[in-house]
Image (cartoon, coloured by chain):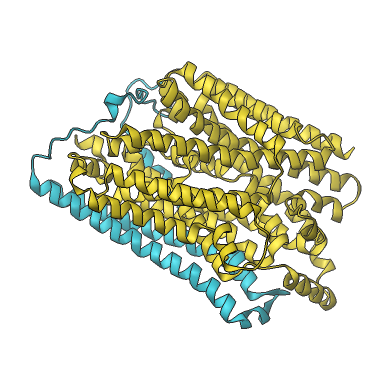
Chain colours: A cyan, B yellow
Amino acid sequence: MEQIPQDSSRQEPPTPGRFAEQRPQRVRVQAPQDASLTVSPARPEHTAEEFYVRQLIRSQLRLACAVAAGLLALLVGISALLVFWPVFEDIRLLGLPLPWWVLGIGMYPLIIVAGMLYNRAAERNEERYRSISRG
Amino acid sequence: MASLLSVSSLVLVCLTTMLIAFHGLRLSRTTSDFYVASRTVRPWWNASAIGGEYLSAASFLGVAGLIVLSGQSGLWFPIGYTAGYLMLLLFVAAPLRRSRAYTIPDFAQIRFEGSPMLRKLTTYLVVVICWLYIVPQMHGAALTLSIATGFPSWVGPVIVAAVVCVTVLSGGMRSVTFVQAFQYWFKLAALVIPTIFLLGRAIPEHSSSGHAQALYAQLESANAMNLYETVSIILALLFGTLGLPHVLVRFYTNPTGQAARTTTVIVLCLLSAFYLLPTTLGVLGLLYTPELGATNETDATILLLPSRLFEGFLGDALTAIVVGGAFAAFLSTTSGLVVSLAGALSQEFFSGTVRGFRISTVLATALPVLIAVVTNSLALAGAIGNVFAFTASTICPLLLLGIWWRSLTARGAIAGLLAGGISCGLSLMIGTFLPQEDEIWIHLLRQPAAWSVPLAFLVMIFVSRSTKRSVPANVERVMALLHVPDWRAKF
């Protein structure tokens, strides 16, 4: 967790003549004119390149869908479980029924862990793409 | 005494916000500064800013209010708000950052440059969504100020609008980023301090078994939502976050697509930490202010709790802290929305100049104040839930299919936006006039997300399939732009 901000600062190109070290580098970007928003219709020169990009998109999509499906199944599953099987209401922890603990606190660590795992896997996919397309 | 403390805490929040904004003024010079802070904001700053912007009146006041109103079902809202961010990370964060677009209409234009019609339609949708989202903030401001100080209800919205106008006009996005980041930590503190004091009083009182029994009866008595409503709200919140214009614009201030993902994970942590507090306060509300559930003023729970548990100065001071935090919530969310809204308006009608942005800012804040003053507030979290349902049925399918499906056509996108927007919007409108009865068609109209989101997706896919020939010629290049890491470094 601690390393993450450093990682991104490492990716910034060094700026010659920066007068304040801690001030972030300014990149001058034009206001979006119509011209800057057009992406040329020309196809990439290498069809292999196109193939690798398709592979990358497919693997990223598969990964994202898997995590999203898991999340959705978990949330809908829990809400259905609570409706059809209310026996959990009777289990109490420090005076509060168990579902209150699960919904009020228990879901958040799961969401954070899912996000971190996804992040790592997505970066691995991009790493793979980079090594293939350069090689 | 009580109102004096609250007013001074309110003034303090407004002054600090404006001071940070003026500090930012010296740093911003170009048009792009005004829009996206020149894309060089660090992940931690940016994550705090996103947290500050996202935690609105609905999160600060509404979550606890909903728990008092509907018990355990209210817990789904903060889960949905957080999980919605996970969906954003999965499908949108990195590609959208790489797209070079500043706003959702810009994205529509990059993906379908041959369709100015689609760009216009998304602009109008963004404007509608922002206004729908600002109005509940104004309602929150009216409620907070009239409860804490007894001022008439138009004062709160006018203060929020004035401060937001000044902050946005003075520095645009860059100063807004600083303001938002500060406001996340301020909101967190404004709930942490009262929660610690209240728990310190409540836990010893309720450790005996008789009191535990009373709590249990209280938890049981709240009227819960049924399964359809719960699932529909989960869907609306999960998919609605993807399409929020003020949230999306934040991702353009990350330097790279990877940094956008890092930022999002930090945001997940910040949101999770925050939502534990309104949840705790909601449970305390069930114990100490249960009568609010009957009066439809549950959003006041957090504001009233301190004075219920503590008498004299301590109660007043804690109330003042909560009032300050609540105003930080209204200010940060509203300024984020106003930046997006003014950006969209000025691009559409003033060809993107700084002067146009300033005129649009005034327009963007004035109208919601008027609407808020003449209308009555719903439950805040419920009103925001409706906006999420609307974005989930419109902007969300456009982004998801636009980013991941190369066969999407402009006509398909337009048809889907219209189908989702009209069906969801109409049923929400009809739903507000219907009595709250337990019949399935009423639930279908009041919580449309479960059917309107799939409908929008299906229409987009179906119409795109039948207009296959008009898939843009540059789709491969655009897809590469969205998905290839470090595009700039390579080309």
Quarter residue B470 falls in: top left
* Residue in the picture at 77% in, 60% down: B293
User: Which quarter of the figure has residue B52?
Assistant: top right
User: Would you say residue A2 is visible in this rendering?
Assistant: no
Q: Quadrant of the N terminus of chain B?
A: top right
Q: Quadrant of the C terminus of chain B?
A: top left
Residue A9 lies, in percent from the top left, at 38, 38
Q: Is residue A40 above or below residue B464?
A: above
Residue B233 appears in the figure: yes
Q: Is residue A3 left or right of residue B115?
A: right
Counting from the top left corner in percent of width and height, residue B116 is at: 32, 32
Say above or below: B304 vs B186.
below
Left or right placement of residue B444 versus residue A118 in this view: right
Task: Tell how many labels.
Answer: 0
Q: Nearer the viewer, residue B49 or B480?
A: B480
Drawn side of residue B101 relative to residue B124, left or right = left
Q: Nearer the viewer, residue B25 or B288?
A: B288
Image coords of residue B178 (percent x, y): 55, 32
The quadrant holding residue B344 is top left
Please tell me which residue lies in front, B331 or A125. B331
